């Protein structure tokens, strides 16, 4: 079916009820004459030790040589207690660097209890990050904005999750879940066999929509901001062309949408905007669009920066996606 094989690994952990621990109990992080409490039935391997790194490299290298593994989800779900200090982190970096050199085509995703390893240090050794185990689209709106403050969207794990979300129990429309996942690498984290024909068609449409705009969403700039009445926005692309996302997670308090100010466009030239989609329910947006958004709308950059973009009405859990082209 054209799919690649990936493996979920947690190599820095060790189970006390294992042959490895029985052979090398000194390989676990521990304090002298202190108990060794487990979490998830695990202790943590001492990555400061060269023999530990050599053992792990040999084990992973054998898997990657024998099996057609093209992706590793590298997880770390056990707290560092006791901590190994900076040398523990450096040991992990050394192991990752060695594996990257031996298997340059294998993609590695950084993960730790969800988004616990979304940092600039490990970015030199991994290809992307899992931002959080929480796939609730309302929660993800804030999570991903925090991620994009520090790291670029093309390495951000953003998936369309199942509904209801396993982390919160809340349900959102497929359209809203897809719109929130759009800025990152746009994965699918649900069982498609549970979708009806209409939902499958909608999911396929969103996948095509992401592929259509991926070159603009990635490898460019990211702008983040907040509007009036709880609206948040982000733009991704280049200075002369970008996608603009306006997202509302909670009901509006003002029945008249307030203009959305976009300060980063101050001094820009003419801005031509097309409203691509309003992602609300499983069907098209039910509220009739104002005449302004039934065609391309043009404003000066200064107008959008200081007066603001006139917004269509957006209900709770709704995202509007605009395409913007800027002419000097």
Image: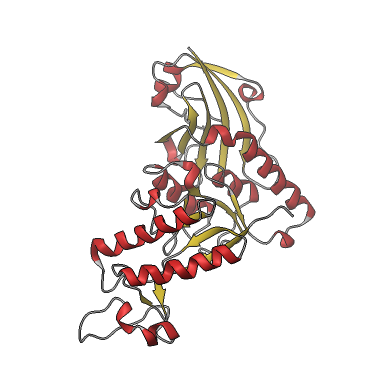
Does the rendering let one see residue 166?
no
**Image spot of residue 162 (x, y percent):** 62, 59
Above or below, comparing residue 203 to residue 301 in the picture? below
**Image spot of residue 221 (x, y percent):** 44, 32
Residue sitting at 49 percent across and 33 percent down?
A: 236
Above or below, comparing residue 174 to residue 154 in the picture? below
The colour scheme is: secondary structure
- Residue 75 vs residue 49: left or right? right
Above or below, comparing residue 292 to residue 1 in the picture? above
Does the rendering let one see residue 246?
yes
Q: Residue furthest top?
A: 328
How many numbered marks appear? 0
Q: Residue furthest left?
A: 32
Q: Observer-nearest residue: 57 or 144?
A: 57
Residue sitting at 26 percent across and 86 percent down?
A: 35
Quadrant where the N terminus sits is: bottom right
Above or below, comparing residue 257 to residue 296 in the picture? below
Residue sitting at 42 percent across and 65 percent down?
A: 113
Picture quadrant where residue 149 is located: top left
**Image spot of residue 65 (x, y percent):** 56, 63
Q: Observer-nearest residue: 259 or 71?
A: 71
Q: Observer-nearest residue: 271 or 91?
A: 91
Residue sitting at 30 percent across and 70 percent down?
A: 49
**Image spot of residue 294 (x, y percent):** 66, 24
Picture quadrant where residue 75 is located: bottom left
- Residue 117 vs residue 90: left or right? right
């Amino acid at each position: 079916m054209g799919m690649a094989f990936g493996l979920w690994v947690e190599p820095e952990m060790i189970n006390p009820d294992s042959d490895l621990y029985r052979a090398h109990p000194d390989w676990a992080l521990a304090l002298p004459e202190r108990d060794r409490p487990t979490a998830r039935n695990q202790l943590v391997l001492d990555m400061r030790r060269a023999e530990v790194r050599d053992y792990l490299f040999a084990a992973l290298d054998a898997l990657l040589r024998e099996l057609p593994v093209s992706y590793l989800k590298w997880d770390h779900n056990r707290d560092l207690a006791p901590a190994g200090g900076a040398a523990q982190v450096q040991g992990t970096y050394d192991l990752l660097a060695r594996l990257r050199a031996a298997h340059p085509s294998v993609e590695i995703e950084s993960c730790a209890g969800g988004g616990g390893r979304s940092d600039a240090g490990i970015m030199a050794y991994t290809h992307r990050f899992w931002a959080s185990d929480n796939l609730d689209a309302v929660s993800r709106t804030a999570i991903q904005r925090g991620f994009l403050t520090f790291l670029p969207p093309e390495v951000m794990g953003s998936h369309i999750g199942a509904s209801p979300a396993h982390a919160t129990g809340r349900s959102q429309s497929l359209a809203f879940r897809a719109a929130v996942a759009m800025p990152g690498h746009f994965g699918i984290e649900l069982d498609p066999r549970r979708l009806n024909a209409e939902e499958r068609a909608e999911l396929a449409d969103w996948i095509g929509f992401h592929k259509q705009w991926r070159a603009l969403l990635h490898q460019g700039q990211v702008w983040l901001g907040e509007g009036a009445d709880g609206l948040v926005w982000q733009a991704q692309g280049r200075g002369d062309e970008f996608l603009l996302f306006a997202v509302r997670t909670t009901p509006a308090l003002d029945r008249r949408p307030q203009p959305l100010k976009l300060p980063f466009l101050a001094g820009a030239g003419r801005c031509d905007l097309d409203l691509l989609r309003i992602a609300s329910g499983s069907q098209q947006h039910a509220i009739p669009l104002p005449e302004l958004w039934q065609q391309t709308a043009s404003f000066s950059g200064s107008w959008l920066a200081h007066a603001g973009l006139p917004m269509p009405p957006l209900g709770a859990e709704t995202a509007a996606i605009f395409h913007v082209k800027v002419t000097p």
